Image: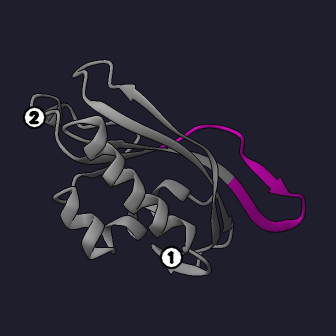
């Protein structure tokens, strides 16, 4: 099965402006324990959020991911969220990390919340990633 989290992380890390904005702090599933003491600061976490849908015998899948954009304030988290939004909405037919991502569509958000451990401000948005199940 295609790991869309890895593909989305690779797209983000390949974008110099976004990678610089968050100082390379782009993670899958959760913030590393080592980052908790540094918060609040700009960072991104991409996590699977269920809702996988396949197309029967066609080897294409749709997976929902949640993108959590951290910042020093909600305003700063919103700046990270806006850059992520602009990057992902134009991600069409991207070949990255041995996978073909057909498109990434906004599915919900943005929603403001605070991270449970550090109380860091977060802007949370959901996306649906359509990708090939065949490794390239």
Q: Residue at x 72, y 46 (%)?
A: 52
Q: Secondary structure at mark 2?
A: loop
Q: 18 or 102: which is nearer to us?
A: 18
Residue found at the very far left of the displayed protein: 38
* x and y, in percent, of residue 49 in the image: 59, 37
Dot 1 and dot 2 residues touching (CB under 8 Å)? no
Q: Residue at x 26, y 47 (%)?
A: 43
* x and y, in percent, of residue 34 in the image: 13, 35
- Quarter of the image where one finds residue 92: bottom right
Q: Which residue is mark 2?
A: 38
Q: Is residue 98 left or right of residue 114?
A: right
Picture layout, residue 91 above or below residue 41: below
Q: Is residue 6 left or right of residue 128?
A: left
Instruction: Name the disc covering residue 98, or none.
Output: 1
* x and y, in percent, of residue 131 in the image: 66, 67
Q: Is residue 52 magenta?
A: yes
Q: Is residue 1 left or right of residue 66?
A: right
Q: Secondary structure at mark 1?
A: loop
Sequence order check: which comes first, mark 1 or mark 2? 2
């Amino acid at each position: 099965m295609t790991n869309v989290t890895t593909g989305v992380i690779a797209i983000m890390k390949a974008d110099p402006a976004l990678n610089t904005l968050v100082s390379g702090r782009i993670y899958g599933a959760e913030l590393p324990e080592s980052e908790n003491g540094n918060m609040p600061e700009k960072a991104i976490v991409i996590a699977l959020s269920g809702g996988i849908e396949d197309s029967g015998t066609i080897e294409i899948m749709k997976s929902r991911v949640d993108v959590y954009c951290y910042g020093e304030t909600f305003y700063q988290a919103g700046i990270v969220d806006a850059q992520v939004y602009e990057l992902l909405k134009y991600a069409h037919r991207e070949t990255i990390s041995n996978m073909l991502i057909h498109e990434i569509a906004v599915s919900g958000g943005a929603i403001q919340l605070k991270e449970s451990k550090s109380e860091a401000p977060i802007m949370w948005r959901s996306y649906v990633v359509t990708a090939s199940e065949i490794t390239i």
